[in-house]
Amino acid sequence: MEFISVKEAADKWGITPRWVQICCKEGIVEGAHRVGKSWLIPKNAEKPVKNKSLETTVNHPQYGQFMPLVTAAYEPGDCCKYIENIKNEDEKNLAWAEYYYFSGQAVKAIPYTEKYLHHEDKAYRLSACMIYGYSNFTIGDLKKSIYALRIIKETDQWARENGDEYIKSMCRFVLSLEAVAVHKKDADKTFLQMQMKILPKGVRLFGCYILAHDEYLKGNYERALGIAETAICVADTVHPIAKIYLNIIAAVALISMKERDEALTHFDRAWKLAKADGMLQGFGVHHNMLRGLVEARLKKDEVEDYMKILDISTRFHKTRRINKNPDMITDFHDDLKPIELIIAILASQGWTNKEIANHMEISTNTVKYYISIVYQKLQVSDRKQLQEHINV
């Protein structure tokens, strides 16, 4: 059999080389096989049709609901009531697991998921693995988190081999979320984009958060904001969990653009949705990225919730750090108080003392004081040296 290169195929079919590679990886180009980082394509292969895999009717058993709480549309404040009214016992259990995880009660989420990790219904299995993995990650049990990720990857392989687009779309969602959660800047989310419209609406909205977060990690702040705001605008029903995360990542992007007032608008929207049902996890995971807004908005008037958010943040970022470098037991984070850490992050990113003061609603003298403390603790003498220590 004769083969041609990706570029030759792209020229022949009148499409981009990148799209050829995507179609090869998705199994749409029959007979293509990988060689190094590229592909060899049969010379007589047919031109792939964009989203062909999504347009084909897939014959598969009827699966249960994937991520039943993220999928759900309910009024803020009615979360527990909504879960209690779920008729299917398995979906109710998984919804409780989601609730406990997203409300910052990871330890309570784990028991609800354990019996579903190898469930024959793969939608339930993936839902359970996602919550089980993230819950264990949050409390610092990296071994169990990795175990859940392995099951997800095995399920993804099964979906590829059996051409099950529905399960493949769920796997894409979970694996893409894992990539942004641990800040894999080089992770490719194109495949999530291709599979997105198969997902239930609430999960689809959460998928937009993943895509926005990915753009943020790449430094494309305006694109991240555009994705998040568009998703929020087009949502015709209230999916509280997805909208919390979309508003948070919009705020994060705006902070990087130094648009504080607009960032506050999104932060306050996210907090209003989160407060109604106690959904604190998103604020804990994004605490460092929100760079002082949690302190400015919640530290004084929401003391109990603020302390819970700090606890989630501390444990989550410690596990992420160990996941990145297993030999790193301590880090500069361990020596800094929350306000010192936030000021260190902002200073390392080129913010002036006045900008930091205005952003955090404190005086410039207070900023100067904390920067001197940071320099002393980290044994650095200027912001250029400080930058070498910071990894948000």
Image (tube, rainbow, N blue to C red):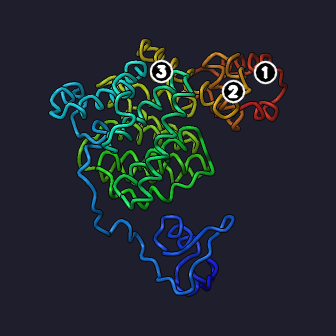
Q: Which residue is mark 1?
A: 378
Q: Position of residue 33 (x, y in %)?
A: 59, 70
* Res. 250 in view: no
Q: CA distance from mark 1 to mark 3?
A: 25 Å
Q: Are marks 3 and 2 in contact (CB under 8 Å)?
A: no
- Judge from the rendering whether residue 179 lies leftward or rightward of residue 229; answer left or right: right
Residue at the (53%, 53%) spot, across then down: 222
Residue ID for mark 2: 344
* Badge 2 density bin: few <14, some 14–19, many ≥20, Cα 10 Å: many
Using the numbered discs, state the Cα–Cα distance from disc 1 to disc 2 in whole angstroms.
10 Å
Vertical order, 53 against 121 (above or below): below
Q: Is residue 1 left or right of residue 372?
A: left
Left or right, 68 with respect to 351, comes to: left
Question: Nearer the viewer's eye, disc 1 or disc 2?
Answer: 1
Of pointers 1 and 2, the one earlier in the residue sequence: 2
Question: Residue drawn 24% across and 28% down?
Answer: 79
Looking at the rendered structure, the kind of residue marked 2 is Ala
The numbered mark, 1 or 3, whose residue comes first in the sequence reads 3
Q: Amino acid at mark 1?
A: Leu
Q: Element at badge 3? A: helix
Tag 3 residue: 309
Q: CA distance from mark 3 to mark 2?
A: 19 Å
The C terminus sits in image quarter: top right
Q: Nearer the viewer, mark 3 or mark 2?
A: 3
Name the residue rendered at 43%, 27% in the picture: 281
